[in-house]
Image: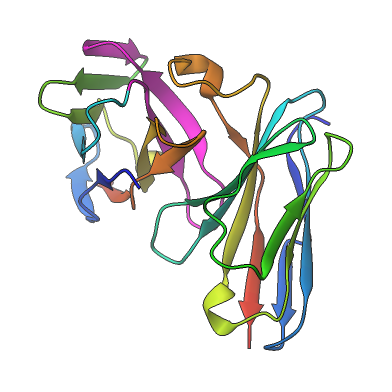
């Protein structure tokens, strides 16, 4: 079982600020990483994936990957109250054909 | 269909009852996954199908859990003799391609709304 670690939060940021969500993982062989957003009582929905070291930007979201440090992060610029949700970090599990998820970080954006 | 459909959305079972949860993936999707999500936790992998073949069932917590996808489309997760610790949301997800280690975007999963099981 590969471990994916996330701070459970809640992470509270004011509206318009940058929210920074972090994830560390233990399997150096992992190659692909995913960020999912899950609203309370809803199913996870994909925000973005990344598999190369560095930054990947999509609108207000930027994923950052550092394989040497085994660290993945998600930055949300200009945070909105509608961004309030749990953010799940996931990786391709090289030992089984599935995504392995962290326990998620709850983000609260204060209006 | 347009999305992954799961039924029932809510199921209350008495301890010891058998339950069956259904997943109808996106039409044409090759890969299908079942996950279990306990309250406040991330989804935990249960099993993976590629078409009708169950290629990985290493996440099934006990032999009371059984999954099938006989025609490579609809899948059923069956839990026999339910226990209170089985209470969770059961999520089904599908993907259009076969799952591979370096797939990146090819391994994007689309989740259904889930089936919330409560065992009394």
| Number of on-image labels | 0
Residue A12 in the image, given as x and y percentages of width and height: 20, 50
- Residue A58 higher or lower than A106, as above or below: above
Residue B29 in the image, given as x and y percentages of width and height: 74, 25
- Type of secondary structure dominating the magenta stretch: strand
Residue closest to the eye, B50 or A42? B50
Q: Is residue A111 magenta?
A: no
Q: Quadrant of residue B54?
A: top right
Residue A29 in the image, given as x and y percentages of width and height: 28, 25
User: At 39% from the left edge and 44% from the top edge, which residue is drawn?
Assistant: A101
Q: Is residue A78 left or right of residue A87?
A: left
Q: Quadrant of residue B109?
A: top right
Instruction: Specify the segment rendered in magenta.
Output: A31-58
- Residue B92 higher or lower than A94, as above or below: below
User: At 79% from the left edge and 65% from the top edge, which residue is drawn?
Assistant: B20
User: At 33% from the left edge and 15% from the top edge, which residue is drawn?
Assistant: A51
User: At 48% from the left edge and 15% from the top edge, which residue is drawn?
Assistant: B103
Residue B91 in the image, given as x and y percentages of width and height: 61, 51
Among all residues in the image, which is located at the extreme right? B71
């Amino acid at each position: 079982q590969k471990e994916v670690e996330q701070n459970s939060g809640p992470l509270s940021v004011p509206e318009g600020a940058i929210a920074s969500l972090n994830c560390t993982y233990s399997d150096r062989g992992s190659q692909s990483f995913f960020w999912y957003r899950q609203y309370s009582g809803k199913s996870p929905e994909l925000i973005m994936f990344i598999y190369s070291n560095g930054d990947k930007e999509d609108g207000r979201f930027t994923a950052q990957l550092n394989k040497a440090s085994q660290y993945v992060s998600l930055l949300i610029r200009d945070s909105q109250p509608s961004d309030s949700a749990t953010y799940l970090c996931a990786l391709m599990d090289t030992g089984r054909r599935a995504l392995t998820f962290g326990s998620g970080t709850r983000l609260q954006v204060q209006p | 269909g347009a999305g992954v459909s799961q039924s029932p959305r809510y199921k209350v079972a008495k301890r010891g009852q058998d339950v069956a949860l259904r997943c109808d993936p996106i039409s044409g999707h090759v890969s299908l996954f079942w996950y279990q999500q306990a309250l406040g936790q991330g989804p935990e992998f249960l099993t993976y199908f590629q078409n009708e073949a169950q290629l990985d069932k290493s996440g099934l917590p006990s032999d009371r859990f059984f999954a099938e996808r006989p025609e490579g489309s609809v899948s059923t997760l069956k839990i026999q003799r339910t226990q209170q610790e089985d209470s969770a949301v059961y999520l089904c997800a599908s993907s259009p391609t076969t799952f591979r280690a370096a797939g990146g975007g090819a391994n994007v999963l689309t989740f259904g709304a889930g089936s919330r099981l409560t065992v009394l």
